[in-house]
Amino acid sequence: MGDAYSIQSAAIALDGRAVGGWKVGRIAPDLVAHYASDRIAGPIFADEIAENGAAMPVYVGGFAAAEAEVLLRFGAIGDREYDLDTVRSCIAEVRTGIEIASSPFGGINRYGPAVTASDYGNNNGLVLGPPIDDWRERDLIRMPVEMFVDGALVGAATMEGMLDGPFGSALFLIRTLRARGLAIEPDTWVSAGAITGIHEVRPGQRAEALFDKRIRVGCSIKSY
Protein backbone atom coordinates (compact mmCIF):
# COMPACT_ATOMS: atom_id res chain seq x y z
CA MET A 1 0.00 0.00 0.00
CA GLY A 2 2.94 2.32 0.59
CA ASP A 3 4.00 1.83 -3.03
CA ALA A 4 0.43 2.50 -4.17
CA TYR A 5 0.29 5.81 -2.31
CA SER A 6 3.70 6.77 -3.72
CA ILE A 7 2.33 6.22 -7.23
CA GLN A 8 -0.80 8.16 -6.32
CA SER A 9 1.21 11.11 -5.00
CA ALA A 10 3.38 11.15 -8.12
CA ALA A 11 0.27 11.14 -10.31
CA ILE A 12 -1.27 14.03 -8.35
CA ALA A 13 1.94 16.04 -8.79
CA LEU A 14 2.09 15.30 -12.52
CA ASP A 15 -1.58 16.20 -12.96
CA GLY A 16 -1.15 19.56 -11.26
CA ARG A 17 -4.79 20.19 -10.37
CA ALA A 18 -5.94 21.20 -6.90
CA VAL A 19 -7.32 18.46 -4.67
CA GLY A 20 -10.70 19.47 -3.21
CA GLY A 21 -11.48 16.28 -1.35
CA TRP A 22 -10.67 12.63 -0.72
CA LYS A 23 -12.64 9.45 -1.22
CA VAL A 24 -12.43 6.65 1.30
CA GLY A 25 -13.16 3.07 0.28
CA ARG A 26 -13.27 -0.20 2.15
CA ILE A 27 -10.78 -3.04 1.81
CA ALA A 28 -12.34 -6.51 1.71
CA PRO A 29 -12.12 -8.24 5.11
CA ASP A 30 -9.96 -11.10 3.79
CA LEU A 31 -7.34 -8.60 2.59
CA VAL A 32 -7.16 -6.38 5.68
CA ALA A 33 -4.32 -8.28 7.34
CA HIS A 34 -2.22 -8.32 4.17
CA TYR A 35 -2.54 -4.57 3.58
CA ALA A 36 -2.51 -3.64 7.29
CA SER A 37 -5.52 -1.38 6.73
CA ASP A 38 -9.28 -1.67 6.37
CA ARG A 39 -9.66 1.33 4.06
CA ILE A 40 -7.98 3.15 1.16
CA ALA A 41 -7.96 6.83 0.21
CA GLY A 42 -7.86 8.61 -3.13
CA PRO A 43 -7.95 12.26 -4.25
CA ILE A 44 -10.98 14.09 -5.61
CA PHE A 45 -9.88 16.95 -7.84
CA ALA A 46 -11.58 20.27 -7.16
CA ASP A 47 -12.73 20.71 -10.76
CA GLU A 48 -14.52 17.35 -10.58
CA ILE A 49 -16.71 18.33 -7.61
CA ALA A 50 -20.14 19.28 -8.94
CA GLU A 51 -23.54 20.32 -7.65
CA ASN A 52 -26.69 18.22 -7.56
CA GLY A 53 -28.00 17.41 -11.04
CA ALA A 54 -24.70 17.77 -12.89
CA ALA A 55 -23.61 15.69 -15.86
CA MET A 56 -20.63 13.60 -14.76
CA PRO A 57 -18.12 12.18 -17.28
CA VAL A 58 -16.82 8.61 -17.25
CA TYR A 59 -14.30 6.62 -19.30
CA VAL A 60 -15.97 4.69 -22.10
CA GLY A 61 -14.33 1.30 -22.44
CA GLY A 62 -13.02 1.47 -18.89
CA PHE A 63 -14.78 1.13 -15.56
CA ALA A 64 -17.62 3.41 -14.45
CA ALA A 65 -19.89 3.30 -11.41
CA ALA A 66 -21.97 5.51 -9.14
CA GLU A 67 -22.09 5.17 -5.35
CA ALA A 68 -24.41 6.71 -2.76
CA GLU A 69 -22.24 8.27 -0.06
CA VAL A 70 -22.34 10.61 2.91
CA LEU A 71 -20.04 13.59 2.38
CA LEU A 72 -18.26 15.36 5.23
CA ARG A 73 -16.74 18.82 4.91
CA PHE A 74 -13.83 19.47 7.22
CA GLY A 75 -13.37 22.64 9.20
CA ALA A 76 -10.04 23.43 10.86
CA ILE A 77 -8.26 20.23 11.87
CA GLY A 78 -5.05 21.50 13.41
CA ASP A 79 -2.49 19.10 14.82
CA ARG A 80 -4.46 17.59 17.70
CA GLU A 81 -5.09 13.87 17.99
CA TYR A 82 -8.62 12.62 17.36
CA ASP A 83 -10.67 9.55 18.14
CA LEU A 84 -14.03 8.38 16.81
CA ASP A 85 -15.95 10.72 19.14
CA THR A 86 -13.81 13.86 18.95
CA VAL A 87 -13.35 13.79 15.16
CA ARG A 88 -16.91 15.12 14.89
CA SER A 89 -15.66 18.44 16.28
CA CYS A 90 -13.71 19.17 13.09
CA ILE A 91 -16.61 18.41 10.75
CA ALA A 92 -18.29 21.60 9.53
CA GLU A 93 -21.03 20.11 7.36
CA VAL A 94 -22.55 16.79 6.32
CA ARG A 95 -24.23 16.36 2.95
CA THR A 96 -25.70 13.62 0.83
CA GLY A 97 -23.84 12.78 -2.35
CA ILE A 98 -22.82 10.47 -5.15
CA GLU A 99 -19.27 9.44 -5.89
CA ILE A 100 -18.43 8.73 -9.51
CA ALA A 101 -15.89 5.93 -9.79
CA SER A 102 -14.26 5.62 -13.20
CA SER A 103 -10.94 4.54 -14.64
CA PRO A 104 -9.67 3.95 -18.18
CA PHE A 105 -8.51 0.56 -16.85
CA GLY A 106 -11.61 -1.63 -17.00
CA GLY A 107 -10.15 -4.29 -14.71
CA ILE A 108 -9.23 -1.94 -11.88
CA ASN A 109 -11.32 -3.75 -9.26
CA ARG A 110 -9.95 -7.20 -10.08
CA TYR A 111 -6.38 -6.65 -8.89
CA GLY A 112 -6.78 -5.60 -5.29
CA PRO A 113 -6.90 -2.39 -3.26
CA ALA A 114 -3.31 -1.31 -3.95
CA VAL A 115 -4.02 -1.09 -7.68
CA THR A 116 -7.20 0.86 -6.92
CA ALA A 117 -5.37 3.25 -4.59
CA SER A 118 -2.63 3.88 -7.14
CA ASP A 119 -5.24 5.07 -9.68
CA TYR A 120 -6.69 7.90 -7.58
CA GLY A 121 -8.70 5.36 -5.60
CA ASN A 122 -10.84 4.90 -8.73
CA ASN A 123 -12.42 8.33 -8.14
CA ASN A 124 -13.57 10.45 -11.04
CA GLY A 125 -15.81 13.03 -9.43
CA LEU A 126 -18.21 13.93 -6.65
CA VAL A 127 -21.80 15.19 -6.71
CA LEU A 128 -22.75 17.39 -3.75
CA GLY A 129 -26.33 16.77 -2.69
CA PRO A 130 -28.50 18.56 -0.11
CA PRO A 131 -27.22 18.81 3.46
CA ILE A 132 -28.25 16.64 6.38
CA ASP A 133 -28.96 19.61 8.64
CA ASP A 134 -29.61 17.64 11.83
CA TRP A 135 -26.57 15.36 11.54
CA ARG A 136 -25.32 16.23 15.01
CA GLU A 137 -28.53 14.90 16.58
CA ARG A 138 -29.13 12.01 14.16
CA ASP A 139 -27.92 8.43 14.28
CA LEU A 140 -26.56 8.47 10.74
CA ILE A 141 -25.58 4.81 10.94
CA ARG A 142 -29.22 3.71 10.75
CA MET A 143 -30.36 6.18 8.07
CA PRO A 144 -31.93 4.27 5.13
CA VAL A 145 -30.33 4.89 1.75
CA GLU A 146 -31.57 3.77 -1.66
CA MET A 147 -29.80 3.94 -5.02
CA PHE A 148 -31.47 4.09 -8.42
CA VAL A 149 -30.16 3.89 -11.99
CA ASP A 150 -32.61 5.09 -14.64
CA GLY A 151 -35.34 4.94 -12.02
CA ALA A 152 -34.75 1.29 -11.12
CA LEU A 153 -33.76 0.41 -7.56
CA VAL A 154 -30.26 -1.13 -7.63
CA GLY A 155 -29.35 -1.06 -3.95
CA ALA A 156 -30.69 -0.29 -0.48
CA ALA A 157 -28.85 -0.31 2.85
CA THR A 158 -27.90 1.63 5.95
CA MET A 159 -24.42 2.60 7.11
CA GLU A 160 -24.40 -0.16 9.72
CA GLY A 161 -22.20 -2.25 7.43
CA MET A 162 -19.61 0.54 6.96
CA LEU A 163 -17.16 -0.48 9.69
CA ASP A 164 -17.38 2.46 12.13
CA GLY A 165 -19.39 4.67 9.79
CA PRO A 166 -18.66 7.96 8.05
CA PHE A 167 -16.87 9.50 11.01
CA GLY A 168 -14.59 6.48 11.11
CA SER A 169 -13.74 7.26 7.49
CA ALA A 170 -12.90 10.85 8.46
CA LEU A 171 -10.65 9.63 11.26
CA PHE A 172 -8.92 7.17 8.91
CA LEU A 173 -8.31 9.94 6.39
CA ILE A 174 -6.77 12.31 8.93
CA ARG A 175 -4.39 9.64 10.18
CA THR A 176 -3.51 8.37 6.70
CA LEU A 177 -2.80 11.78 5.19
CA ARG A 178 -0.76 12.83 8.21
CA ALA A 179 1.36 9.70 7.79
CA ARG A 180 1.90 10.73 4.16
CA GLY A 181 2.85 14.27 5.17
CA LEU A 182 -0.25 15.78 3.55
CA ALA A 183 -2.27 18.54 5.21
CA ILE A 184 -6.07 18.69 5.10
CA GLU A 185 -7.18 22.25 4.44
CA PRO A 186 -10.50 23.61 5.77
CA ASP A 187 -13.43 22.95 3.38
CA THR A 188 -11.89 19.71 2.13
CA TRP A 189 -14.56 17.10 1.38
CA VAL A 190 -14.39 13.44 2.30
CA SER A 191 -16.59 10.95 0.50
CA ALA A 192 -17.02 8.45 3.30
CA GLY A 193 -17.65 5.19 1.46
CA ALA A 194 -20.24 3.36 -0.63
CA ILE A 195 -23.41 2.66 1.33
CA THR A 196 -25.54 0.58 -1.05
CA GLY A 197 -22.73 -0.85 -3.14
CA ILE A 198 -20.82 -0.06 -6.34
CA HIS A 199 -23.32 0.30 -9.18
CA GLU A 200 -21.95 0.25 -12.70
CA VAL A 201 -23.26 2.94 -15.06
CA ARG A 202 -22.78 4.00 -18.66
CA PRO A 203 -23.17 7.27 -20.58
CA GLY A 204 -26.78 8.28 -21.10
CA GLN A 205 -27.95 6.89 -17.78
CA ARG A 206 -29.09 8.76 -14.67
CA ALA A 207 -28.04 7.87 -11.13
CA GLU A 208 -30.04 9.01 -8.11
CA ALA A 209 -29.76 8.37 -4.38
CA LEU A 210 -32.49 8.81 -1.79
CA PHE A 211 -31.43 9.37 1.81
CA ASP A 212 -33.81 9.03 4.75
CA LYS A 213 -36.75 8.61 2.33
CA ARG A 214 -36.71 12.37 1.68
CA ILE A 215 -33.35 13.78 0.54
CA ARG A 216 -32.55 13.29 -3.16
CA VAL A 217 -29.29 13.71 -5.04
CA GLY A 218 -28.76 12.80 -8.65
CA CYS A 219 -26.65 13.17 -11.75
CA SER A 220 -26.58 12.17 -15.38
CA ILE A 221 -23.69 10.17 -16.85
CA LYS A 222 -21.84 11.30 -19.95
CA SER A 223 -18.69 10.27 -21.78
CA TYR A 224 -15.50 12.32 -22.08
Image (cartoon, grey):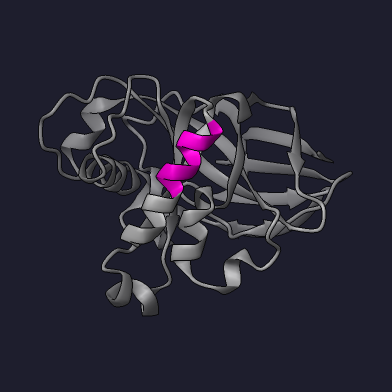
Residue that sits furthest to the bottom in the current view: 30
In-image side of 125 versus 89 (left or right): right
In-image side of 84 versus 205 (left or right): left
Q: Residue at x 62, y 37 (%)?
A: 125
Q: Residue at x 44, y 38 (%)?
A: 22
- Give x and y (percent) for residue 93: 40, 24
Assign the C terminus to one quadrant of the image: top right
Q: Is residue 198 or residue 4 the one in the foreground?
A: 4
Q: Residue at x 10, y 37 (%)?
A: 81
- Give x and y (percent) for residue 73: 40, 27
In-image side of 152 versus 70 (left or right): right
In-image side of 34 versus 60 (left or right): left
Assign the N terminus to one quadrant of the image: bottom left
Instruction: Let me know if residue 130 appears in the view.
Output: yes
Count of picture labels: 0
Q: Is residue 118 or residue 169 the one in the foreground?
A: 118
Up-down: is 41 above or below 21? Answer: below
Is residue 94 part of the magenta span, yes or no? no
Q: Determine which quarter of the picture holds residue 31.
A: bottom left
- Give x and y (percent) for residue 39: 36, 58
Instruction: Let me know if residue 192 appears in the view.
Output: no
The range drawn in magenta is: 8-15
Principal secondary structure, stretch drawn in magenta: helix
- Give x and y (percent) for residue 139: 35, 43
Q: Determine which quarter of the picture holds residue 33.
A: bottom left
